[in-house]
Image (cartoon, helix red, strand yellow):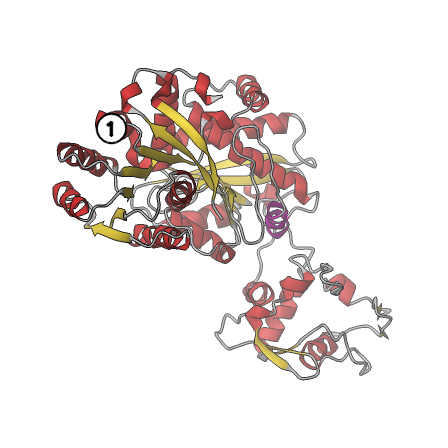
Amino acid sequence: MIGCWAKSELVRTLFTALMFLAFFAGMPALSPASSASPALTPAEERGRQIYFEGTSPSGVPILAYFGKDYLEVPGESATCTSCHGFDGLGRTESGVIPSNVTWQHLMKSYGHVHPDGRLHGAFTVESLKSYMRDGLYPGGLLGDPAMPVYELAEQDMDDLIAYMKRLGVHPDPGVSPTAVRVGVLIPSDGPSAQLGEILSATVRASFADIGARGGIYGRRPELIVEKVAPGQDLRAVLRRLLEDRQVFALLNTVTPGQERELETLAEEFRVPLITPFAPTHTDDQQLRRYRFHLHGGVREQALGLAAFALKKLDAEDPRVAIVYPAREEIEETAASVEEACRAGGWQRVVRVSHVPGGFDAASTVVRLQAGQVGMVIFLGAEGEADAFFREADARKFLPSFLMPGFLLGKGMSRVPPSFAGKVWLAFPALPEDRKEWGLAEFREVTERQGVAATNPSVQLTAFTGTKLFLEGLRRSGRDLSRERFVESLEGVFEYDTGLAQPLTYTKNRRIGTLGTHVVTVDPLKADTEGFISPKGWIAVE
């Protein structure tokens, strides 16, 4: 447990983790022929969009009509995949049994007998188009009443048919009977380059270890490392990685300052993405199907601090100030924190912003002291927090101070003694999350593969992400595809890696450990184990 750690060892571990968090504001290669599959044609790509998204690449609206009253809904609200699944096999839901729409099944020469007893002859391309438009099986028999009919352009119908011919038979890039190829993006230089190298080395060791034991369903995971130079076009880099190197998924990427762009590109290219930490701002998780984060970022830590304060600090409607730099993503986080405070019953909440890089500690402290603020939720940088503490200490202004731990960084060792019992920090992970069996597994793998433990916090995080990826492969089974992999991860519930809080994902949740640890920092105990004291895990909904 964390209380048994010496102060110096614990702080060193936390400082390393802080550096790692700050940079995330996130084997021999196969020959191209060994895992590459025939690329979709332009028509099939357009059909794929229609099948998965219910929208036309041309921009022409697609409409769906339900029931005898022909209730109209947009195509994106009645996608093919929502009932028939990513592989076309159908998923029983709410008593409805959607049809198998793979081409081999649809074109059976002897026709079909449906679960409701309806019997009809074989489909042709034209009769299938008629069914999707008019709801009539071959021979004029009324079709499945749960199936909507669609209004879509002839070109869109042809494109959809073209893609349906590939359903269930088109292997995704990076997948062969003997291997699955995985990409990692790391910086080519700069302050985070070394962390990227350490992280990718850990992933490579994990892959080599599982490969030496036969892989998963006979497939050995293989790593492709792509280095990104500062200012390099991320879209071009990712396109090269996906199209030329044919990777199946992205794992443990390090793209400082480009996390949100990478997420957007992952959605655009429909490639699964597993990263250690969520970006500063986490928007509606339903809009990001392909990304999976192990831990939350600034937003989740700040919301966890607010929830902790509401439950644990026993303050009756204090005056609260949220202090932050006026950047878009931090603005959104500050607004979420204010909303959470007000929803919890605290109404005297103000937001105090400053120009990024232009924090005036003296005027801010004067303003907050004059307003009798009793609690500060600080979302600025380490140097800004240092300046705040100096000014507040000088003016004997001693509010409760709450801050995401990685933003404060090494500044936690410079908290003035006057703030003893006043400082609470949030961390998405702590050493106490690690279990002996999880650490033993990590040690065994790295020792077998000859990898030195040069930066345990980074390596353990990388190892955790790799375990999640491998678990997704196991759950996906032999018929591996990106969509099956994503669906498998969406079913992960309280998966214990032995190195972090249990991971849970759903269709609407893309952060595995959705919460934060809260700790106190007591500067009066700077040379003792009590310098940092955990106050529990706070779940964030």
- Can residue 104 be seen? yes
Residue in the image at 27% along x and 25% along y: 413
On the rendered structure, is 524 left or right of 455? left
Residue 535 lies, in percent from the top left, at: 43, 31
In the rendered structure, which segment of residues is drawn in magenta?
481-490
On the rendered structure, is 370 left or right of 530? left
The crowding category of the residue bearing disc 1, from other C-alpha atoms within 10 Å (few below 14, some 14 to 19, many at least 20), is: many
Q: Main secondary structure of the magenta part?
A: helix
Amino acid type for the residue under numbered disc 1: Val
Q: Does 398 sit above or below residue 104?
A: above
The stretch drawn in magenta includes residue 140: no
Q: Does 4 sit above or below residue 19?
A: above
Q: Which residue is mark 1?
A: 415
Q: Which residue in the rendered view is the most extreme toward the front?
A: 316
Indicate the quadrant where residue 385 lies.
Answer: top left
The kind of secondary structure element at disc 1 is: loop
Q: Nearer the viewer, residue 485 or 357?
A: 357
Q: Nearer the viewer, residue 298 or 63?
A: 298
On the rendered structure, is 89 left or right of 43? right
Q: Nearer the viewer, residue 255 or 21?
A: 21
